[in-house]
Image (spheres, rainbow, N blue to C red):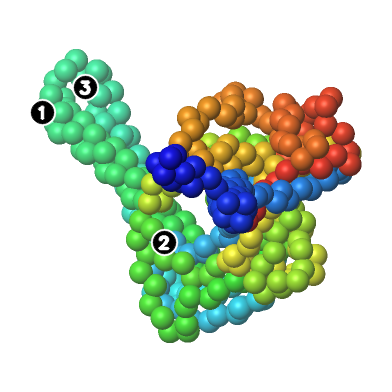
Amino acid sequence: MEERTSLEKILTISPKSSGKKLILGIAILAIIFGVLILVFKTSQPKVNYRTVKVSRGNLVVKVNATGTLKPFNQVEVGSEISGTIRSIEVDYNYKVKKGQVLARLDTTRIESELLQAQAKLEGEMANFKKVQADLTLAEGKLKRMLEAYERSGGRTPSQLEIEIQRSEVQKLQAELLRSQALIEEAKALIKLKEAELQKAIIRSPINGIVLARHVEIGQTIVSSLQSPALFTLAEDLKKMQLILDVDEADIAQVQVGQKAKFTVDAYPEKEFEAKVQEVRFYPKTSQGVVTYEVVLEVNNPELLLRPGMTATAEIIVKELKNVLLVPNQALRFDPSRIYKKEKRGFVSLFMPAFPRRIPQITPLEKKVWILKEGKLVPIPVKTGPSDGQFTQIISDLLKPGMEVVVGMEEK
């Protein structure tokens, strides 16, 4: 009987103790559930997407390059003869005309040599006349001797005398030819000295302006195979050339006739207009970088631009009107990195993770992304030219006013 009573006491739970334990169990379950919810929420990345509206507008595609301004025709004027500078008739920035005297060399030596050549010519001409007269007499004597020889039947004069006279005639003929050659030589020397007198006067070969003067009065000029430069002239600076070095990646876009704009450091706020005149095929290589020269035609009516100035130019290779445009960031946006950075929560340690489908972008297809009900949706597009900031888009699915994703921020 006592044993039964003890068992009942053990199995019997008082209402007061049962209520406390129930409340404690519910509290413990609530804490565990709250922790699990907190862990689950923190395991999910929160993303804010940045978007930009698609718009229509004009697109100007440009090729950027730097170069140097040069005159259309720059000439180095030198001296063809050696001598000493006697006078200088022009200086820096002088406007000159073709044929105008720039400088004169001292001609004392040349004039002396010319007088000597003229005197030699006179002497040779006098000698020529004397030899010519002697030859006439000798030929007459030989003729008479031959006639006498015929009349005498070969008895007189003797054959020896005839041969001696014939030799004399031949000698005088040779001397006459030599004298004639000396005359021609003297005439050529006179022409040479007269030409040197003309060359001693340095003249401008073009209409233009004196960019530089490289000589002083009294300076000795030594002429050689490469004539030393005395002056640097340029044709009318109201028209100039801008020689650009264009990168090989851009050269295919550049064509003759395209418009261009450029600036120079002297006038940083002013834009000058130009036009592509020539695209050269010869490559230039510097430190492994290949460039090609592009020549721009530049009008310089106010003479603000000067030879040697460095210019930064933009060649307008394409202009598109009223086309669909999106920022380049929209084409570079890659949503796959969201999934790569996801963290797994506490519950996932006890539950198998199912693979989540990631939107794929094929290498040959361009896409932009829009938000639909908070989710990313890809829009396939074809791309046109780009100016480095915006790109033309060709797509029936993308309309002006729609917002495309250009970036995101994770919290």
**Which residue bears the numbered disc 1?**
160
Relative vertical location of residue 67 with respect to residue 214 in this rendering, above or below: above
Q: Residues within 10 Å of mark 3 (few under 14, many from 20)?
A: some
Query: Can residue 215 be seen at all in this image of the molecule?
Result: yes
Numbered mark located on residue 149 in the image: 3
Tell me residue 265's x, y (percent).
Answer: 65, 72
Q: Residues within 10 Å of mark 2 (few under 14, many from 20)?
A: some
- Per the image, label 1 sits on a secondary structure element best described as helix
State left or right for residue 368 relative to residue 294.
right
Q: Residues within 10 Å of mark 1 (few under 14, many from 20)?
A: few
The residue tagged with tag 2: helix, strand or loop?
Answer: loop
Amino acid carrying label 3: it is: Tyr
Can residue 242 be seen in the rendering of this structure? no
Sequence order check, earlier mark of 2 and 1: 1
Rendered residue at 49%/60% (across/down) = 195
Q: Nearer the viewer, mark 3 or mark 2?
A: 2
Mark 3 residue element? helix
- Amino acid identity at mark 1: Leu
Contact (CB < 8 A) between labels 3 and 2? no
The x and y percentages for residue 409 are 64, 53
In the displayed structure image, the side of residue 282 where residue 384 appears, left or right: right
Depth-wise, is mark 2 or mark 1 nearer the camera? 2
For the view shown, which residue lies furthest in the front direction? 1
Name the quadrant of the C terminus: bottom right
Where is mark 2, residue-wise? 227
Report the Cα–Cα distance between label 2 and label 1.
63 Å
Q: Amino acid at mark 2?
A: Ser
